[in-house]
Amino acid sequence: MAQLPSHSSPKSGSSPSSNSSPRGNFASSNPKRPGKCTETQPFKLHTQRRGLSKVELMAKLQDLLAQEAKQRVPIAQKLPLTTDKSEVLPKGPVKEQTKPMKIKLHTQLRAVKRAEFNDWVANKIYLLEQERLKEEKLLKLMEEEEIKMLRKQLIPRAQLMPLFDRPFFPQRSTRPLTMPKDPSFHMMRNQCSHCVIRSGLNSLHQHVV
């Protein structure tokens, strides 16, 4: 059988770095360093942007107001240094003054007609009121006359005695006396109702006659 090669022990003079693993070499070349701290960055909020835009608008408005205030201040302007005479422009032809026309508006015509109609209505109401007053006065007079007549009639007065020259003498009637007749209570059995009614009517007629 073949013999396995025996591992030779390391020499005492050999350095430990020669027998160390490559991981150990990397660790020895790159030692651990402390990590950097994270830098805080502020959030960009929408409200902050809106606030900045409002501030800008207010600044612009203040600038505009300041410019308008400066423009309102009157500044005297110097006259130009010239020796030229001012030109006198010729006057144009004078126009005749316009004469107003007498226009009759429809509203004026309607106002006149309306006034006439109002007068007519007022006169009619006045006449009706006068007629009503006259009727009331006549009715009042008639009532007073009726009251006077009633008062006169209510006064007791003496009445004349009646005349008894023609006394009343009653006369005897010429009508014949009625003859009494006994009623027939015992009827035949075979007699019909119509016959009974007819016989009763005949008997009544005879009694009346």
Image (cartoon, grey):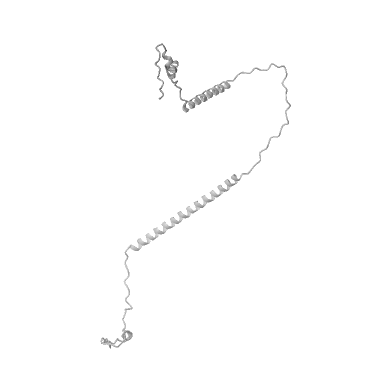
* Rendered location of residue 112, percent (x, y): 58, 46
Total labels drawn: 0
Residue 99 image-quadrant placement = top right
Nearest the eye: 38 or 182: 38
Q: Residue at x 51, y 52 (%)?
A: 124
Q: Picture coordinates of residue 31 (x, y %)? A: 43, 16
Q: Residue at x 56, y 22 (%)?
A: 67
Position above or below: 137 against 32: below
Quarter occupied by the N terminus = top left
Q: Is the residue 62 above or below the residue 185 in the image? A: above
Q: Nearer the viewer, residue 52 or 7?
A: 7
**Quadrant of residue 176 within the rendered picture:** bottom left
> Measuring 43% from the left and 15% from the top, which residue is drawn there?
18
- Is residue 63 visible to us here? yes
**Quarter of the image that includes the C terminus:** bottom left
Answer with left or right where residue 196 lies relative to residue 107: left
From the viewer's perspective, is residue 82 above or below residue 123? Answer: above
Q: Nearer the viewer, residue 157 or 7?
A: 7
